[in-house]
Amino acid sequence: MTRDEELLVEKTLTSYRRRGIDGEIQPSPAWADLSPQLRETAFEETVKLRKVERALGMSSTVRAVLDRIHRG
Amino acid sequence: MTELETWQLAAIRAGDTGVFSSWLAGAEPVLRRALRPFAAMVDTEAVLQEGLLKVWQVAPTVKEDGRPEVLLRFAHTVVRNQAVSEARRLRTLPAGATPPPDSDPPVELSPPDPMLRERIGVCRDKLPGKPKSVLKARLEAEGNTHDGVLAEGLGMSLNTFLQNFTRARKLLAECLKKAGVDLALELSP
């Protein structure tokens, strides 16, 4: 993986996602620029990262969902 | 269906976010694994978050069916349908094409692993300054802040922030491997 590809994958690993005008959670813009193979890599790395986050308290995905629920 | 599940479902139906939060912690890894076949078709993180929000919104209508983990099985269907719908919207799954086969519906939540928690905590504490600070920043952001904002808060460019995060992940994985934990194996179904 090149350094640019590594950065692109890293950008998708955050659980931060924008909301669209209709309120739907939007895909990461960086994800659209990944090749199918790098999308698989991003998935695997996300799974590992969420496992680490979960072990340290709560996964950032769960935190993001709860934050959206609390904000209404 | 156990008494605990019955109580849990009733509380979630009634809008108890604390109980939903506990349920989510166990359900998220299981539901994410179910999205594995869609990894190249959709941004599974966005799909999972949208699906979990829908589960919360529709949970009051979920009825017990006498079998275990009704909410988890319901969520599995919601998240999978969300993935199929998003893949069709993005045309990564062409109209008329058959979606990837469904995995078996999950039958249990993913339990916490105190041993893994301890080992990850030890390895996290051994991280050098910048990788440790970017990891901390993302964890504390709770998924509601763009990395660019977090980077600015730490006085870094976005690229430097991301490079430090990559370094943090690699160092954590190496440290865990030395402690006998292979995250890739840990994550196998």
Image (tube, rainbow, N blue to C red):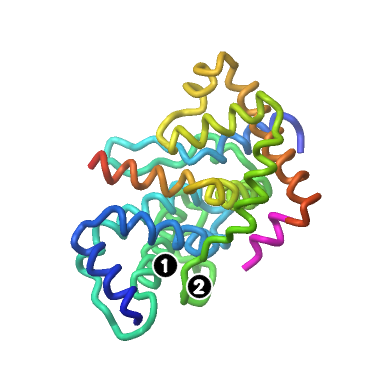
Which residue, given by chain and number where applicable, does mark 1 sit on?
Answer: B76
Q: Which mark is residue B102?
A: 2
Q: Is residue B158 magenta?
A: no
Three-letter code, disc 1: His
Residue drawn 20% across and 68% down? Answer: B61
- Report the quarter where the N terminus of chain B lies: bottom left
Q: Which residue does the image show at 24% across and 76% down from the upper left?
A: B63
Check disc 2 and report its element: helix, strand or loop: loop
Residue B166 shown left or right of residue B42 in the figure: right
Q: SS for tag 1?
A: helix
Q: Which mark is residue B167?
A: none
**Where, by quadrant of the figure, is residue B25 drawn?**
bottom left
Q: Are marks 1 and 2 in contact (CB under 8 Å)?
A: no
Q: On the same chain: label 1 and label 2?
A: yes
> Percent position (x, y) of residue B66?
31, 86
The picture places residue B156, in percent across and down from the top left corner, at 59, 16
Q: Residue furthest top?
A: B155
Q: Mark 1, chain letter?
A: B
Q: Badge 2 sits on which subunit?
A: B
Rendered location of residue B108, percent (x, y): 47, 73
- Around disc 1, counting alpha carbons within 10 Å, would you say few (fewer than 14), some (14 to 19), or many (20 or more)? many
The amino acid at mark 2 is Asp
> Mark 1 and mark 2: span between their CA atoms?
10 Å
Magenta stretch bounds: B182-189
Q: Residues within 10 Å of mark 2 (few under 14, many from 20)?
A: few
Residue B127 sits in which quadrant?
A: top right
Give the number of callouts: 2
At x 39% / y 63%, what residue is drawn? B81
